Amino acid sequence: MLPLLVLATALLSAAALPEPANSRSGGILRLARLFDPATLDAAKVELTEDVLLVPLLNQTLLDVRDGTNLVPNAASEWSTSPDKRIYHFRLRPGVRFSNGREVVAADYVYALERMLDPATACGMASYLKGIRGASGFTARLTNHVAGLSAPSRETLNIEMERPDPTFGFILTSQGVAVPQEEVARLGPQFSIRPVGAGPYLVREWKRGVRLRLARNPHYRGVEPQHLDGVDILIGGDETTHLMMFERGELDIANITFAGIPRPSFHRLSRDRRWRDLIESEPLFESDFITLNTEVPPLTNVLVRRAINHAINRDKWEHVPDGYATHGEGVIPRIMPGFNPALRGYTFDPGKARQLLSEAGLPTPVRTVLWHPLDGLSRDEAQGVQEDLKQVGIELTLKPVTFAQLETAMQIRHQVPMGLTGWSAAIPDPVDILGQQFDGRAVTNAATWNQAFYQNPEVDRLLDEAAPEVDLKRRFGIYQRAEEIIVRDAPLAFLGHRNMYGLRQRRLKGALMDSLWTYRFDRVWFEP
Amino acid sequence: MSPMTRFVNRLLWSCVTLLSTAVLTFFLLNALPGDVARVIAGSKASPEVIKEIHAKFHLDDPWWKRLGFYLGQLARGDLGRSYVTDQPVAEAILTRLPTTTALAAMAGMMWMVVAVPLGALTARFRGSRFDRITLVVATLTLSLPSFWLARMMQYWLAYKLGWFPVAAFRSLWHLVLPALSLAILFVGYYARLIHTQMVEVLDSPYIRAARAKGCSETRVLFKHALRNALIPVVTILGMDVAGMLGGVLFVENVFALPGVGTLAVQSVFNLDPPVIMGTVLFSGALVVGANWAVDLTYGWIDPRIKHAN
């Protein structure tokens, strides 16, 4: 099959790789996180903080730079067929697992099949469902995924059901080799002491106390092993971690998705010790309030539009302070396919009142907003409550844990309004639009379409866009879909989050990343 | 009632208490909206994965079947496994127990060292400036919420002045500040309690008799009076164990201590029912155990109670 392929992507040579740091001073990177990782097994990782550990312990087939540029990693060369249906990878020779065994293409076949196996409970398996034969394998009709093959030790082929120009990005997080013999040997312990090909391995994980990573002696990768190890304190909260950082006990201030706590940010940005070390990164993320289109009064599009007009979103998202980027729709400004011409809802309480009057509902209109417990979300929810009250909508606030919110929102008729957002795993509109607005996902089963939004025209456009390999045309279709979604207002569109980070002066390298939030494998200490 | 009958009776009621705690927690967790499978696999999990998790943890079974399974597990001494980390709940609690025990013991020693003499001395010198100042300070410490006090002490004594480590648990020294913030909460209350009891006891005829016999004031205070004054204090201490656990929970979280409190908080944020139920049940067992301990201590403090029993 391979000779028939026309190489559509130029083979990338090592010369095109980012230049590694010249100085490698070693040292232990000291971090802190709130809780233990749920797992260290890359196939099962789900939480943002756990995902950050994946590049430390594993070497993915491809990597991504500057948010959108695919670069070789464990695969030294890669190419796709012109229709973006078949992906061909040549593995970098000499890449080894931390147990010393050489990584071969069959390890990727095994790893991808393991992720697709529902028994593994891989939350990201749905991103792999486009591989030919994946659905049959998942339904246990076959014991092998037809689209995965390893013709030689160093060659891996992945065939998709239909063209997918974004699959390379999925492999930057999911393309992780797994040694089958170690999974069999370690059983559930593989989640605690995984064997990967990354620059570090697990030295010690004392639950609730610390996680220690040490150098993988067999590591051969693109990125040098800058550090001697990583020491992660487990426990405490953001304020405690920030105090520890300021006293020099940690090297990076807050590695949560929220970054530096906002009340502290103002103090730090005025402190000459820290102000020039604060850095920010726009994320592939969209903040919004989901409006459940099946729950009255939100079944009425006029009410949903009135809510959008009533919220002073730039104020509550702290756009003027730089915490977020102004948003008109759901696709973030930094994402390919962003539509600069899109116009959403201006802050216009008069217009909101008029729309409510047209809706003919008795005032005040009453509904409930669920929101996460953290202070940031609480402040935002209270701000929205205040805005909506001005136009005649009375909101009852329901604070819940994030886990409760996430799960409750996927049940029909449960959550009228939910303060939430979406972090894209790949820099393409398919991630943010295809998952949340597909009307066919609205069944009695749990769904990502948390607004329970249905519009056949949007479904048609999503189907048309997903396999489109002409990027200009692809993005054009997604932009049309986004326009319809914005018009139908299944969400109150708030904006796109930016993250602030802070590190010690002697820690160098590209730390913050739009997709990963942080990359600890790329930093080093100045000697 | 023979001692054996009383013991069996007490044991039975303890079991009923723990069983009720287990059942109540089970129902409360079941009343929560949401799907635990979504928490385990994440918001982006496919329906197949969700279905698999439902099957694995019997989440689709009727409530009575799951309750029966859970109680059966408990009867075998098995608290189950965490849905999120797959760690056995008993192991998770036991690995964190030493930290919580060390913290509670250190805090207990601190308040005992301060509260007992303070209560006795303010009773001895009641009405003095020392007594009045102590009363004001005690009232102040009574009013302080544990999370606020812990944070303030961390901020001033560790972060600003650098006298203590900010957080983490690497040696006993790391426990001093958390234990101090926990102890302060109880010192004021117990100092006043001991004070009140001592005032009453110091007016008793046998104390006057002891003084008349020429006993030293120290001996009168700490040998004759204190022992009797401690009886109600011990009762309240037993009842306060639950409240102390609440304080431990906050303090452990602020100071990043790997104790049972942080485990409980983590399980709530993770919506991890086996761990939530395990930690609640463990707390229940502690309270029941503390009440048993109080009963035993009575006999030691006041032999008349032992003889009457």
Image (cartoon, rainbow, N blue to C red):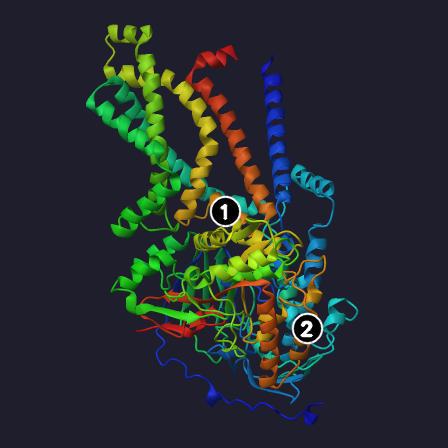
Instruction: Give A17 or A326, whichever is nearer the viewer.
Output: A326
Q: Considering only vertical position in the picture, is A198 above or below B157?
A: below
Q: Position of residue A419 (x, y in %)?
A: 53, 57
* Residue A8 located left or right of residue A257: right
The reply to whether dot 1 and dot 2 touch (C-beta < 8 Å) is no
Describe the element under mark 1 as helix, strand or loop: helix
User: Most extreme residue toward the right, as rendered?
Assistant: A141
Image: B160 above or below A248 = above
Viewer-proximal residue, A525 or B20?
A: B20
Asked if one can make out residue A343 in the rendered structure from this viewpoint, the answer is: yes
Left or right relative to A233: residue A336: right
Three-letter residue code for mark 1: Val
Question: Which is nearer the eye, A507 or A488?
Answer: A488
Residue B39 can be seen in this image:
no
Which sits in the foreground, A381 or A19? A381
Q: Which residue is mark 1?
A: B265
> Could you tell me which chain the residue with mark 1 belongs to?
B
Please give the count of numbered marks on the rendered protein. Answer: 2
Residue behind mark 2 = A457
Image quadrant occupied by the N terminus of chain B: top right
Residue A247 spot, x, y in % from top left: 30, 57
Looking at the picture, how far across and down is residue A229, in whole percent? 42, 67
Q: Amino acid at mark 2?
A: Glu
Number of residues whose C-alpha sits closer than 10 Å to that of mark 2, classed few (under 14), some (14–19) or many (20 or more): few
Determine which quarter of the picture holds residue B99: top left
- Chain that bears disc 2: A
Please name the residue shown 32% across and 47% down the image: B154
The answer to whether A149 is drawn above or below residue B307 in the figure is below
Closer to viewer: mark 1 or mark 2: 2
Q: CA distance from mark 1 to mark 2?
A: 45 Å
